[in-house]
Amino acid sequence: MFIRASHPAQASASSDIANIIRTSDLSKGSLQAMKDFKSNPERFLAQNILDISGVMKSNDRTSTTSMLNDVLKKGYFALIPSENENSKFHLKPVNVSTVAEAENVIYAHWIPFKSGNVTPGYTDIPKIPHHAPRDDSAIFAFTPGMNGCALEVREHPTRDNYYRIFHNQHPTSQVQTDLIDEIAGSKVDAFTESEYFQHNNALLMPVAANIMHFDNRQGGWAFISQPQGINMHNNAVERMSNSNIIFRYMTE
């Protein structure tokens, strides 16, 4: 899957949000960060801040948001170094033109967020990515930041080699459970607020960057969480004070 740019792009976090970044414009720092992230995401998150918020700020003129949320639910992403903070990277959709360029960035599933009493956003991921078709072979899954939501893993309703993963916006609500039951199989696991919530600074609005990663060494999917906070004065994403990276393998 390729995301095409409709406007010239700048490979910086302050570039116009209407732009899709071109892989050819990525800095050495960006390329190294993605190499490090793919090699060991848990260690990368322990050393750097991952700001996912920029993914959903893409202007609709590029159709990036609607394509990710409603159609593709997967794509190529880049880590763009912050211009204002060291060891902070912004996750952004990226334009890929060749197979070689694709190898330098992050190919990932996207689990969309839906607000209100509606069916939670979801995507389907293979239980074993390297057994799946190439366009489904991503070993990462990203989703918007969470504050009370849950990553809920269900059996796929028709494909026994896939999971259906939900960004459940109301995990304690029977309404959402019933809606999920209509389009998914039995519950496998859930990564909830009780695991990732670390609110250690009253000046920050808590949020967590929760991702999924298929660990080839262990042969299974894992949840990784970076506790964060939103600075209420400038809306900047910061690392939550005195927090720890959460890592656990998914129950199968």
Image: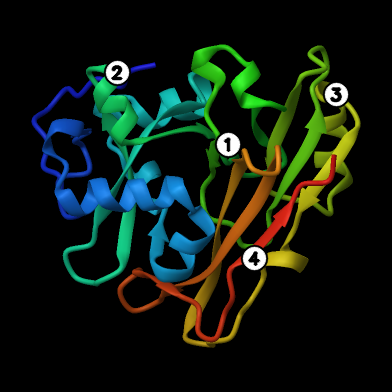
Residue beneath the point at 52% across and 23% down: 70
Label 2 vs label 4, nearer the camera: 2
Q: Which residue is mark 4?
A: 246
Mark count:
4
- Residue 205, image x and y in percent? 51, 74
| Mark 3 or 1, closer to the camera | 1
- Direction from residue 128 to residue 105 in the image, left or right: left
Mark 1 vs mark 2: in front? 2
Position of residue 113 relative to residue 135, above or below, is below
Q: Label 2 belongs to which residue?
A: 99
Q: Quadrant of residue 166?
A: top right
Q: Which residue is mark 1?
A: 111
The quarter of the rendered structure image containing the N terminus is: top left
Residue 248, picture quadrant: bottom right
Q: Earlier in the sequence, mark 3 or mark 1?
A: 1
Report the residue at 48% width, 20% height from top. 72
Give the CA distance from mark 3 to mark 2.
Answer: 38 Å
Q: Residues within 10 Å of mark 3 (few under 14, many from 20)?
A: few
Q: Amino acid at mark 2?
A: Val
Q: Is residue 228 left or right of residue 173?
A: left
> What residue is pinned by disc 3?
182
User: What residue do we see at 17% from left, 22% from top?
Assistant: 6
Give the residue furthest to the front. Answer: 217
Q: Nearer the viewer, mark 4 or mark 1?
A: 4
Q: CA distance from mark 1 to mark 2?
A: 24 Å
Q: Is residue 119 visible?
A: no
State which tag comes first along the sequence, 1 or 2: 2
The amino acid type, in three-letter code, at marker 4 is Ile
